[in-house]
Amino acid sequence: MQARAPKPAKSRYKGRIFSQILPDTGLSGRALTASMSIMCYLACLALGTLIIVSKSVNLWSSNIASEVTVQIRPANGSEMQAAIDKALEVLKATPGVTATTVLDKSDAAELLEPWLGSAKVLEELPIPRLISVEIDPDNPPDYDQLANSISVEVPGGSLDTHRQWQAQITRTAGTFTLSSYGILLLVSIAAVALVIFATRAAMEANRDTIQVLHLAGAENSFIAFQVQRHFLKMGARAGIIGMIGGLASFAALGFATKSDQAGDLAQVGRQLLYGPLAFSPENYALLTIVPLVATLISVTTARLAVVSMLRRVL
Amino acid sequence: MVRFENVGLRYGLGPEVLRDVNFHLKKGSFHFLTGPSGAGKTSLLRLMFLSLKPSRGNARIFGADIAAISPSKLPKMRRKIGVVFQDFRLLDHLTTFENVALPLRVQKQRPASYRDDVMELIEWVGLGARADSYPPVLSGGEKQRAAIARAVISKPDMLLADEPTGNVDSALGERLLRLFIELNKVGTTVVLATHDLELLNQYSAPRLQLKGGELNVTG
Ligand SMILES: Nc1ncnc2c1ncn2[C@@H]1O[C@H](COP(=O)(O)OP(=O)(O)O)[C@@H](O)[C@H]1O
Ligand SMILES: [Mg+2]
């Protein structure tokens, strides 16, 4: 036992980093870090869903919003071509309309072919004609007034602004958004509960040490700080693991499936990670919220839990 | 400094461990606390180092009623009291040096300001070669000396030592007693609990004698 030569007394402990007052054992167990990481991963997925949904909705909405259609149904006793000309006249006089394209009868027939069969039949049928109208999205026309003019002045004419589609997309997106927020909320609550239990276990495991610290004159805040730093490390670690897991999942989503259809999971996953440069860095930044919030949750929860527990001892 | 009047103590619903305890410790005094094992020495000391509240009676320390000290004032009061626990209560994950420095560390003092003092005290109690060792590898006597060093490092106003010579040979026991006497001479109020007759005979000081939960002051 006496074999080791003593070091010179004065030089010892110069610049030395002291051991942690509370040991790691019983404080940041693997099970805790693992559970916390899983929650952070789920939070990442929910956050990713939020981003995808909001980006997609913006994209779809702006596409839809920059185009409206005028539909002219064959009306009794009216000449189709005259109705089309009248509609074009009304449209040209409307500020905010940038271009108009009259779809040929054959175009219209083609659109209907899957339902009605060969083009020959269609030629004899009175089918509605469509005028595609491009809109200046920054300066859109007064749709109500335009719809009114079309239906009054153009026989059989009506304006389709795709608004019901837009409303439906918005509602669907709203449902997704709401459930993502719900998941984030539940995951956060679960994380808080987890940290409270872990803090209790940690205090129990270190009961003797904490008592010695108290009797040595430690303030509750000092002890809370010692516990807190473990949970800071744990929260940050779990958050980063969860975030990496989330990013990896989005990347896998992007790579694993080769499909390239706009709006499908693979395409959306790729877009989320690398896609249009304009919003990619912003997405990464948003995902780093997960480790930040995880750290914040575990530190503040641990602190509050410790302080409330310490208040109950003499 | 410490005044107990008709103090009684019971653990939970058990019998009274201390009954009608009356005594007064003046600032700068030195007292032995004696009595057979189980007489209540540790319990009495626990009242004095604010780890227990009396079940009845009036117990005052530094002028404050022990039963009524607000939790926010406890740390300040405890810093004025150095304690050598009967079972040492060293922290196993800290080195001897870190254990001894603990009271200063919880007061958030800077390590640079106390490093040399701590090392000097460790040398003085003969643990110079053990400064980097952890308590589990220390012998009983070494642990005891580390515990004593921790109790006195912050120069407390009052030192409460619970059988601090129970694990050391008589030569070292004598040396530790001299340390307590030295500390007392520079103004520390000392209460030394022991049932070691040899130690009691080496220094004449008033005795608080516990027996069957009752206390008599002699000398
Ligand atoms: N935490 C405790 N809970 C219940 N009884 C205790 C506790 N600590 C001590 N006692 C009892 O109080 C009595 C006095 O014990 P103690 O103060 O340790 O005596 P001493 O230190 O003189 O040996 C003993 O009968 C012991 O069993
Ligand atoms: Mg005892």
Image (spheres, rainbow, N blue to C red):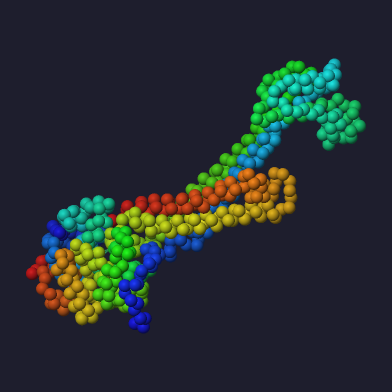
Q: Identify the residue at horizontal 73%, vertical 48% (top origin).
A: A260
Query: Residue A60's spot in the image, x, y percent?
Result: 68, 37
Please tell me whether residue A159 is drawn above or below residue B196 in the rendered image. Answer: above
**B6 displayed left or right of A146:** left
Count of all numbered marks drawn on residues in the image: 0
Quadrant including the N terminus of chain A: bottom left
Which residue is pictured at 55% across the width and 43% down the height?
Answer: A181
Q: Is residue A224 above or below residue B148?
A: above
Q: In which quarter of the view is residue B124 placed?
A: bottom left
- In the displayed orientation, state which residue is furthest to the bottom: A3
Nearer the observer, A67 or A99: A99
* Image quadrant assignment for residue A222: bottom left
Instruction: Decide if residue A131 is in sight here.
Output: yes
* Towards the viewer: A31 or A145: A145
Q: Quadrant of ligand 1?
A: bottom left
B6 left or right of A214 in image: left
Q: Residue at x 51, y 57 (%)?
A: A238
Look at the picture and state if B208 lies above or below A54.
below
Locate residue B145, reporting x and y percent.
26, 74
Q: Residue furthest right?
A: A120
Q: Position of residue B182 (x, y in %)?
A: 17, 71
* Residue that appears at 81% across and 28% down: A102
